Amino acid sequence: MVILIGDDISYNDFGCLGHLIIKTPNIDGLAKNGLTFTNAYLTASSCSPSRVSIMTGRYPHNTGAAELHSVVPADQLAFPKILKENGYYTAQAGKWHLGAYVYIEMPGATKKATVIHRPGPF
């Protein structure tokens, strides 16, 4: 399962969703071979509260992290944690803004890679 969350992207900024100029062959391939969700509801107008809402399934004001760059309280249950507890590998790349980072080098990696572990519900 791969979930892409992007900031400042319109629904039709991808080739697979109808953009005639912007070329997005990798995302188009993911869409062609997977599920594409075309209806969404934005729970907050800023990135971190929206991100925590997507990961917990709760409105931002019910997560304890309703403001931009808020640390998510450890008592919040997020679906990446549920996946990890059931044997799935979970990772996050890119923008976070929801709490502290702890960088851990991946042992045995063929390329230099870093796993980012965050204390708390994720």
Image (cartoon, rainbow, N blue to C red):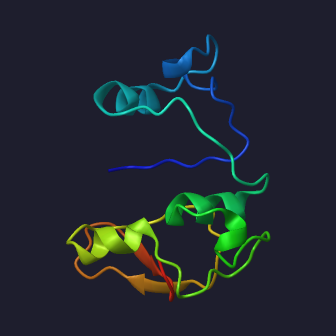
Residue 2: x %, y % from top left: 38, 49
Q: Tell me, yes or no, if residue 16 can be seen here.
A: yes
Quarter where residue 62 is shown: bottom right
Residue 31: x %, y % from top left: 39, 29
The number of numbered badges drawn on the structure is 0
Task: Identify the residue at horizontal 47%, vertical 34% (top origin).
Answer: 37
Q: Is residue 40 above or below residue 98?
A: above
Q: Is residue 9 above or below residue 81?
A: above
- Frontmost residue, 108 versus 30: 30
Quarter where residue 63 is shown: bottom right
Q: Tell me, yes or no, if residue 97 can be seen here.
A: no
Residue 69: x %, y % from top left: 75, 74
- Frontmost residue, 33 versus 120: 120
Task: Identify the residue at horizontal 40%, vertical 68% (top origin).
Answer: 80
Quarter where residue 100 is shown: bottom right
Q: Is residue 3 above or below residue 56?
A: above
Task: Identify the residue at horizontal 42%, vertical 31% (top origin).
Answer: 36
